[in-house]
Image (cartoon, grey):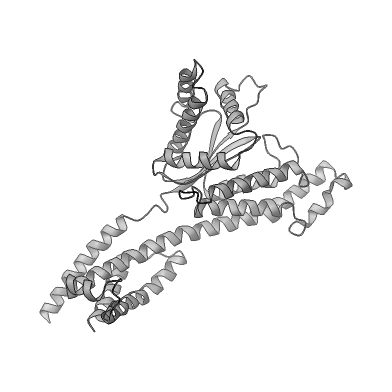
Amino acid sequence: VFYGCTRWAIISFLLRCVSSLLSSALPLTSSSETRLVSVLRPNWKSPLTSAIHKRFWYWKLDTIGLATENLKSRELSDQVIRTGNGAFCEAIVIANCARIEVLVHTRFSSEETISLITEMFCVELELWERNANSAEQRSRDLAAERGEGFPDFMTITSGVEEITMYLAKIAAGLPDENGVEIFSPYSSRDQHVLSQLKECFEAASTSVGTPPPCRARLGCILRNVLAAGKSSRDPSAVPELALIRPALSPSKDLVQSVAGEVLEKAIQPAVRRCVSESIAIGRGSLIATFRGNVETAARAAVAMEIGQSEYDRNCRSDTHDGLGRRRDKWYRAVRRELHAPTVALREGREVDEAVVAELASKAALEAATA
């Protein structure tokens, strides 16, 4: 009895050590954030518009055009991933005639994110201007203008809710401070902006020899943004849209009122849905890592108890002979122990991984040695 208790005490201690080490290697969850770096079209007539802002926009018009082509969007999105050197988990670059947006999911702060994006644009500008005598100086000007803060022509938005609301308004064609003066859901131009957004999303979320730069987290945002854009033009989703058909010559006040209805009935529900889905995606990553850690701890306990050679022969996942059933027994026991904690994590409750690992390991040992 003493031997059995001592042996289990040693195994329990080692399990806690393993669990602690594994939990320290958890992937980014709350420490990572979704950020959007935006550059709006310069006000060409304003004396306050910097020369570097105008030069940047010349580069945008020359290399990207009024809107991002699919191939260029994918190329720039991949470049953002490379620029981050592992810090940008996902990225997509979107542009239209009024703005260029860089959407990323990253562990970097706002300052670090905008600094890296600016550095990428510095390189792009230098390549664009490499045949000009002033190319090097112009690139230095861009870097210098960044200084310790943000460039005066760049803004950054953080958080799934804020970013989704911002992009959904653009997709819906709601009035903003940079070009859209009145809501016009029947405008072919505004609908074209929605089509451009969809094409950029499809290009960045498709595997083309390399993993797509836009995956689950950013894909969640863009799918809901596109859904909001479609609903904003659909009278079945917003019945008030029928009141402002061009043939009725609606007043500006009525159009503004209907825009408010679109915000409430099409955009806000999409934003709430996106936030909920994003939380679920984050929890999914956490749950997968949690389950993997517990299974690893249980596997180590079984191997320690019966001996590594015996474990390799009878309990490994690639064992195909009759003796492999012992592995199935302990694995099923672990999964039974994981059920309740997994449900708790899905509901947003906290779970003590070390305690679960110990309980699951005890169940695995009993099953493996039965």
Give the image quarter of residue 290. Answer: bottom left
- Considering every residue shown, the one lying at the far right of the view is 248
Give the image quarter of residue 144. Answer: top left
Q: Give coordinates of residue 24: x percent, y percent.
A: 30, 55
- Considering every residue shown, the one lying at the far left of the view is 3
Instruction: Identify which residue is drawn at 59% across, 34% down.
Output: 64
**In this view, 143 is above or below 225:** above
Instruction: Identify which residue is drawn at 41% across, 69% down.
Output: 342
Image quarter where the N terminus lies is bottom left
Q: Is residue 87 visible?
A: yes
Q: Is residue 93 visible?
A: no
Image quarter where the C terminus lies is bottom left
- Considering every residue shown, the one lying at the far bottom of the view is 370
Number of numbered markers:
0
**In this view, 333 is above or below 43:** below
**In this view, 155 is above or below 327:** above
Query: Camera-side residue: 92 or 39?
Result: 92
Q: Give coordinates of residue 288: x percent, y percent.
A: 40, 63
Query: Camera-side residue: 340 or 327?
Result: 327
Q: Give coordinates of residue 282: x percent, y percent.
A: 46, 57
**In this view, 170 is above or below 366:** above
Q: Give coordinates of residue 307: x percent, y percent.
A: 16, 73
